[in-house]
Amino acid sequence: MPKVYDIGTQHFVQIIRQPLIWNKKIQTKGWTQEITAPYRFGEPLMVRLPFKYILVVGKWQGSKNEEDALNSALKRRDVTYEDFTEKAGWTPAPDEDTEAYL
């Protein structure tokens, strides 16, 4: 996890290694969520630097409770029965026993 450097009480900066290919992009919007107290979050501006580094500069937008912050960091969401319908794109498993054919 890259180190976050606070600039005052509302702004922050990070330097991170480039984890993906940006093609010809120079800048993009990002997303940051702290996983330790005070669990702040923000949507910083990310600027590509030479040698596969990225400069991240942003403003903290608020904080969350511990559970919400960790769920956001892991991109976890609660699934419901409606997520497993054919209308939602779910293909049900076959009814027959597939191990019998092995």
Image: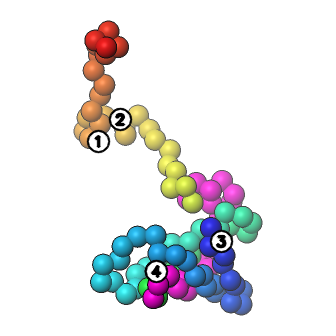
Residue numbers of the magenta segment: 50-72
- Callout 3 amino acid: Arg
Query: Residue 22 versus residue 74: which sits nearer the camera?
Result: 22
**Label 2 SS:** helix
Q: Residue 29 at what x, y percent from top left?
A: 43, 79
Q: Quadrant of residue 63?
A: bottom right
**Disc 3 crowd, CA 10 A, few/some/many (<14, 14-19, 20+):** some
Who comes first in sequence, dot 3 or dot 4? 3
Who comes first in sequence, dot 4 or dot 2? 4
* Mark 2 and mark 1: Cα distance apart in space: 7 Å
> CB atoms at circles 3 and 1 under 8 Å apart?
no
Q: Which residue matches tag 2? A: 84
Most extreme residue toward the front is 51
Who comes first in sequence, dot 1 or dot 4? 4
**Label 3 SS:** strand
Judged by depth in the image, the label closer to the viewer, 1 or 4, is 4
Who comes first in sequence, dot 3 or dot 1? 3
Q: Which residue matches tag 4? A: 52
